Amino acid sequence: MEITPKPLTSEKSKLSKQSLWWRFIKYSIVGILANSGLWAIAIVYLKSTPSTYTSEAIFNVAGSGPGVSVNLPDIGQASTSGASAFGSASSDPRENYKIIASSTTTIEAAAKSLKIPEKQFGEPRIKLINNTTLLSIAINGQDPEKTQQKLQALYQALNARLHSLRQSERAERDLSNQKALSNAQKRLTEAQRRLSEYKAESGLNSSAQLKELISNIELLRKQRSEIYAQQEQLGSRLKQLSVNLQLSPQEAADALVLQTDQQFQKSFSEYTTATTNLKALLSDRGPNYPDVVAARQQQEASLVMLLERGKVLLGKPVEQLTLERLNLDNSNGSGGERAELFQQLVTLESDYQGLIAQVTTLTQQIQKLETRLQTLSQKETVFDELLRQLQIAEAVFASTLAKVDLGKGDPFGSFPLIQIVEEPTLPEEPTAPKPKLVLAGAVLGSLLVTISLTLIWWRDPLTTATKKSSKKLWHERNRF
């Protein structure tokens, strides 16, 4: 009797269905538990997490401020020029402000102004807006109004901190500037003192003094040349007249002196009369005749008186021939003209001697000035060096003073002015937690859990079917 395998197959099919059912129940329970846990976490998070509000504000950091530039072509001029705080590619003042706003000092001051603990104040979030001079600051809080107040307090604390830093920088700069100004003033005073002492010692007051001295020397030389030319011209006339009169200028002067003396003229007239009488007697008598002897004695007596008077007038012995040459007797009508020529000769001589004296005086003055010029020229090098040091000291002092005065108008040099572009916002809705985002996450998590369990569910049947197919193929191969 043949036994059929049908009941065994039916039994296996029944067992397989039961196993499948238990697997379904098991995976369903796991899926329900996983999804329940996921949704429970989401709901608990939404219920237990306090609402967080965010207040945000936008600030502008001033991009330019007054800079100082000093130009001293004539010592004392100064000008100002604009300087940008963003002019350097290696630094951005907003980065400095970001660090200062996030610093413990600033946050502590802001929290203190609101009378809350520093930890409760929180950390601000600062973002630099590219390609602008703006930055945004945001801060979180659990109450809309308090969050807005926190951001306002942070801005005030930041401004106070910047003001303190500016004051500190200004105080240090003022101290440094005053020290530099004091040193510059000391150098200026010392340079002035040395130059003044050298002026008093050397007698050289300025370089213009040498130029003026050279100009005076040239002027005196020109005057001397002109006077010397007049002297040469007058000397020629004097020499020619002296030759014509056969008298020297001194002899002409003596003749004029004798002519103006009445006693001399009387004695000369007596001498002339006695000489004439003697010549008349000698024409027809011998020298020993009594009347000739008497006439000769009278002539000799007149001559003695004449010579003595001439000696008194001229201050020197006078010879008879000299007196005859100097005679300006106008008895024959030519004495007046001759006297005029004598007078002209004396005048020319006087003028000539005057010109000689002027040339001599000018020469002495020129020599004196040239000696002084040589002495001062040797001292000019030291004078110029002291003057240059004084000019440098004046330039440094004027430059330092100008920088100090102009720099006082730039309190925002290192820390530019910060302005509110958008006031701190009053948040209307909380930024955290976000229910929609949490629910979306829960839904996505549920989908992932369900898909994962489904894939695991299908893994065993697929593995079993694969094994059966592989075994069947192996048996068929062996049979052939």
Image: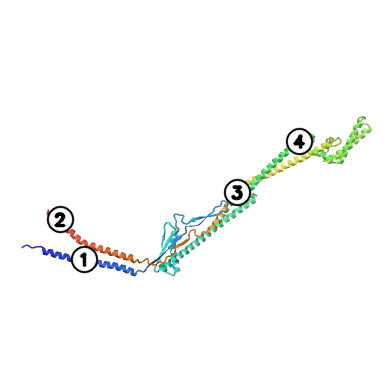
Q: CA distance from mark 2 to mark 4?
A: 167 Å
Which residue lies under the disc numbered 2? 474
Q: Earlier in the sequence, mark 2 or mark 1?
A: 1
Front label number (2 vs 1): 1
Disc 4 marks which amino acid? Lys
Front label number (3 vs 4): 4
Q: Position of residue 192 (x, y in %)?
A: 60, 53
Which residue lies under the disc numbered 1? 24
Q: Position of residue 131 (x, y in %)?
A: 42, 56
Q: Are marks 2 and 4 in contact (CB under 8 Å)?
A: no
Identity of the residue drawn at 15% across and 55% down: 474
Q: Quadrant of residue 128?
A: bottom left
Q: Quadrant of residue 420?
A: bottom left
Towards the viewer: 227 or 51: 51
Residue that protrudes farthest toward the left in the picture: 1
Q: Position of residue 480 (x, y in %)?
A: 12, 53
Which residue lies under the disc numbered 4? 239
Side of 213 relative to 54 (left or right): right
Question: Within 10 angstroms of label 3, few (less than 14), some, or many (20 or more) residues?
Answer: some
Q: Earlier in the sequence, mark 1 or mark 3?
A: 1
Q: CA distance from mark 2 to mark 1?
A: 32 Å
Disc 3 marks which amino acid? Asp
Q: Are marks 1 and 4 in contact (CB under 8 Å)?
A: no
Q: Earlier in the sequence, mark 3 or mark 4?
A: 4
Which residue lies under the disc numbered 3? 384
Q: CA distance from mark 1 to mark 3?
A: 113 Å
Disc 2 marks which amino acid? Trp
